[in-house]
Image (spheres, rainbow, N blue to C red):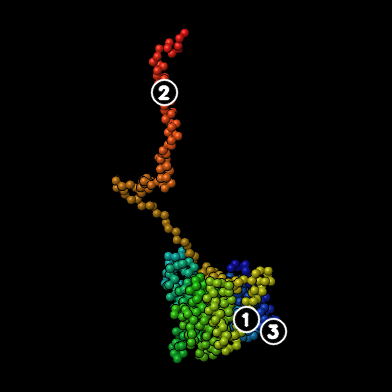
Amino acid sequence: MHPDQIFVLFFIAESILFRICGDAVQEPYLYSSEAKMLKVGYFVFLRLTVFHLCSKLQPYKEHKSRLNAYLKVLFHCEACYQPFPNVFFAVHFMLRTGDIFCNAGEIETDSALRTSTVNNSDQKTKLLHGSCSSSCEEPCQAECKINQFLWHCILIWFCVDNKIQQLDEVLQHLYIFKDEVYQSNWINAALGLIVLGEAAKRNMLCLMLLMDLARVSMTQGPESEHKQLEDYQQDLAIWPWQLCYIYTTILSDISVNGSTSDIQKAAFAGYGNHMSLPTGKFDLEGAGLYQLLQYEPSAVFSDCSESGWRVRYSAVFNLQKACHGLRGDMTREGLRNGMFKALQKQKKEEEDSRVLEAVRVAEAEISGLANLSRSAGRKPPSSIVNSGLTQYMGWRIASVLSQQYLPPVIPHIPLPTKPKRTKLLPWTLSPQQQSFKKKPTRPSLREEILQAEAAYKRFPDINTRTDSYLRSVIENQVSQEQTLIRLLPQSTVLGPV
């Protein structure tokens, strides 16, 4: 994420809002192009929010002023998208984040935005002691607008990404600050869940903590409300539906892109004793996608009924996309079959037609991505989820925020040490002398055969023996004649004159 992108991001955001507020809201039906524009708008505003947390949007006052004017018009158009929670969430996210970074220097009334400056105490500094070059110093008061929950989520991802051993301690600290999720401003909590979900792709403990936060938040509520609502301690929907939608999106991403099969299965079916598909009465103990299909909160608050069907809509929508994302992968055919059966069961048992509409919306989004690839002359990807924008979104957010709020990691390089010398006794050999000492070696089988053949002499046949005997007789006769000639006088040798 480079600051040069900010100008382009503001231009894209203004173009999308101009198109949505001008023509799209006047249409009687939701078109796929409109849903795509709002999804792109969600990613654009998400990136602008990250730039705002890094204090990069201060020079762009004119762009923020123009964008704020469009946001005021979008506020009056949000009611058109209420039947579609996935699109409605994008509109809510754009409105809330746009109000944060467009009015950051003017409006001071949003207490949730301003209450959380990261005060890194000595206890938190010790979490990275020995792994970082310096302690986690307190960021600047004017630059830091994240709460403790988001900061600990970034720290958890940092520990997982760099394989820091203090991960268990950080997980325990995050659970202490879980009540900060229930603030009126849910943007920090949403970013924290996204970052924690990215860590949960590679670590089962992080996934269990994420699902435990959802289980406690959607069935009990914060501890501060237990005293006031003792009669409603069970089944309180405290999380806003926007966080529930993000949570289902994270589970869908983990079930497809998790690093291990156990993590993928736990994201779908739950963890612990709920790794198999539960049956019977609704139970959120496992807090997986399958359990969210049956979510039905009690009517404790005025918006609980709306939250219930929206959570089930989000579960069906993301489960449909995850099931399509696993198509063609024979190694995970069992997981895909489980998702497909869960969807078919939900279609038969679901009585709210608004929830069943999620299947059509998901299929339209999937087919839209495939048609976009065909129009560009490329082969449609076999996995829409894997090729989507959400696969690396959490990693990029966590990476940028960790660079902003955490110190860099310096690799541990051991200092050079002199080798220790051992004293040897006079009659012992040093290791080097022992290595050069010749050891008796046994000849190979080939060498033994060659040596045996060389030592073996063949017995001569009759012809050879006869020739050898005749040769010895002739040589003996010649030797005798020469001896006789030497003994006779010379005259005898020459003959008569």
Mark 3 sits on what residue? 27
Mark 1 sits on what residue? 361
In screen coordinates, is 244 left or right of 172? right
Look at the image and tell me whether residue 150 can be seen.
no
Q: Nearer the viewer, residue 354 or 439?
A: 439
Q: Amino acid at mark 1?
A: Val
Q: Residue at x 47, y 61 (%)?
A: 411
Look at the image and tell me whether residue 422 can be seen.
yes
Q: Position of residue 370 (x, y in %)?
A: 64, 74
Q: Residue at x 43, y 37 (%)?
A: 461
Q: Which mark is residue 477?
A: 2
Q: Nearer the viewer, mark 3 or mark 2?
A: 2
Q: Position of residue 306 (x, y in %)?
A: 56, 88
| Residue 337 found in image quarter | bottom right
Do tag 1 and tag 2 residues touch (Cβ < 8 Å)? no
In screen coordinates, is 74 left or right of 480? right
- Upstream in the sequence, badge 1 or badge 2? 1
Q: Position of residue 311 (x, y in %)?
A: 55, 84
The number of discs equals 3
Label 1 vs label 2: CA separation? Answer: 123 Å
